[in-house]
Amino acid sequence: MKIEFRKVPNTRKDFCIEVDSVKFSGTFCKISQTLVDVKSTFVGNTDVDCCKCGKIFSIPVDEEINFLLSYGIYSSNDERDLDKIIVEIDNKVIDFEELLQSELESLNSEYHICDSCSSDDDFIELEY
């Protein structure tokens, strides 16, 4: 789902996207000429790599994430914005699928250990 920055309503609007069994849903609204507030949840399962053996396995995803989308460079001294992920939009179009993919990639870049490696106490580093 894509929406132009200038067409974002001032009242909350619902959205829902599902990609690779992860549902990304929530609400969004414009809070100023250059800022959009997005309150969202990620629910489902996603595949990640084990950092020890390289095996791909599925983990559950259940997160609430608040975004602050800024048209252009964001600058503020407001401490209330510290609990939000700030995303600067350059091309005047908000792409919710891109936000979802970015969060999934961020989750995949973390260290995950599969069940068989977590039960193994030996420290073995395998090259794969």
Image (cartoon, rainbow, N blue to C red):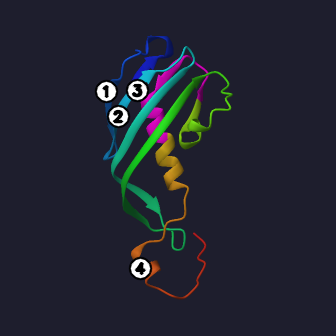
Question: Could you give the CA–CA distance between mark 3 and mark 1, rounded to whole angstroms?
Answer: 7 Å
Q: Give yes or no for residue 65 being in the magenta stretch.
A: no
| Separation (CA) of disc 2 from disc 4 | 35 Å
Residue 62: image location, x then y, percent: 36, 52
Query: Who comes first in sequence, dot 3 or dot 1?
Result: 1
Q: In this view, which residue lies farthest toward the top?
A: 6
Q: Is residue 39 above or below residue 109?
A: above
SS for callout 2: strand
The amino acid at mark 4 is Ser
Say if 125 sits above or below 83 in the image: below
Q: Which mark is residue 26?
A: 2
Q: State whether residue 114 is above or below residue 29.
A: below
Q: Give the range drawn in magenta.
A: 88-101
- Nearest the eye: 67 or 42: 67
Q: Which of marks 2 and 4 is in front?
A: 2
Q: Which amino acid does label 1 sit on?
A: Asp
- Name the quadrant of the C terminus: bottom right
* The N terminus lies in quadrant: top left
Q: Position of residue 98 (x, y in %)?
A: 48, 33
Q: Are marks 2 and 1 in contact (CB under 8 Å)?
A: yes
Q: Residue 14 carries which label?
A: 1
Crowd rating for badge 4 (residues with CA inside 10 Å; few <14, some 14–19, many 20+)? few
The amino acid type found where label 2 is placed reads Gly
Single out the mark in the foreground, 4 or 1: 1
Sequence-earlier tag: 2 or 1? 1
User: Secondary structure under badge 4?
Assistant: helix
CA gap between label 2 and label 1 equals 6 Å
> Relative to 70, is 21 on the left or the right?
left
Looking at numbered disc 3 in the image, what kind of residue is underneath it?
Phe
Q: How far apart are marks 3 and 4 (CA)?
A: 41 Å
